[in-house]
Amino acid sequence: MTPHLPFRERLARREPLVGLLLSLPSPELAEIFVAAGCDWLFIDMEHGLLDFTAVQRLVQAVGGSCPCIVRVPNNEPILIAKALDTGAAGVIVPHVNTPAEARAAVLAARYPPAGTRSIGAARAQGYGVRLADAIAHDNRHTIVVAQVEHVDAVREIDEIVRVPGVDAIFIGPFDLSASMGQPGEVSAPEVQQAIAAVLSACDALALPCGIFTVDGAAARVAGAAGHSLVCAGTDTLLIASATKRLIGEAQAAGSGPHV
């Protein structure tokens, strides 16, 4: 592990990077996750209760101490630009099923002439103070992650991974399983074969591959399989599981005889 290196370099080196998904608009949770040792934060606008104000507050809360990658709701240029304008390190673009969709995501995340990102004076540009610097340099630092979560994308994966500017592939196993007629059955042999095919295509080009998991044990298995960008769970799952465990322990402690 080389945490002193910029996150983009650590990602490119395919270091094991473990993060958690934030779906609640709580800067305090972001601070707690970073203090606990997360390598990155997955800020979820697709399924989470987050608007752009909430996203920016989460990014501000960690103060640059941990990279925030925002999953935008869809592959729309304005959404990608607004997510990056918060100062996030990059974007995860969901439902990338074709090379054309991957190219569109890359273009939306890059300033001209390399792309089509609209030029604004938001937080990422120092509210205008560092606008010229942002235009000149931010293309090199912005991370674009294409999320593969449909069997159609698996069929196109050899071409998707070759799209210039895609910095990593991230697998959504639950939607992938649903697209294969086995919703939620991520351990089904056919689903695991599809996941392995995506990982193999990434390995062939030394491209980082990541995946969503539901707990630490599953994250450890994913890391051992070769996934480098691993999401080890969500804020809501952590709270729910910790609360259930706490209540169970408390009830067990009070179940003995009373004197």
Image (cartoon, rainbow, N blue to C red):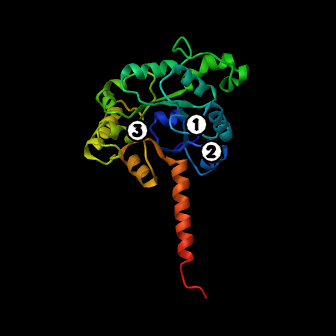
- The answer to whether residue 199 is above or below residue 185 is above
Question: Front-most of 81 and 224?
Answer: 81
Q: Secondary structure at mark 2?
A: helix
Please report the residue visible at 47 percent of the width from the left and 22 percent of the height from the top. 105
Seen as rendered, the residue at the extreme bottom is 259
Question: Front-most of 222 and 97?
Answer: 97
Amino acid carrying label 2: it is Ala
Inter-mark Cα distance, 2 to 3: 22 Å
Q: Which residue is mark 1?
A: 68
Q: Which residue is mark 2?
A: 30
Residue 209: name its quadrant. top left
82 lies left or right of 103:
right
Q: How many marks?
A: 3
Inter-mark Cα distance, 1 to 3: 18 Å
**First of labels 1, 3 by sequence position:** 1
Amino acid carrying label 3: it is Gly
Between circles 1 and 3, the one closer to the viewer is 3
Q: Residues within 10 Å of mark 3 (few under 14, many from 20)?
A: many
Residue 205: x and y in percent read 36, 29
Q: Which of the numbered marks, if any, corresponds to residue 111?
A: none
Please report the residue visible at 68 percent of the width from the left and 26 percent of the height from the top. 123
Tell me whether circle 1 and circle 2 mark residues in contact (CB < 8 Å): yes
Question: Front-most of 21 and 3?
Answer: 21
124 lies left or right of 210:
right
Amino acid carrying label 1: it is Cys
Residue 164: x and y in percent read 42, 21
Q: Residues within 10 Å of mark 2 (few under 14, many from 20)?
A: many
Residue 101: name its quadrant. top left
Please report the residue visible at 43 percent of the width from the left and 47 percent of the height from the top. 213
159 lies left or right of 34:
left
Q: Which of the numbered marks, if any, corresponds to residue 172?
A: 3
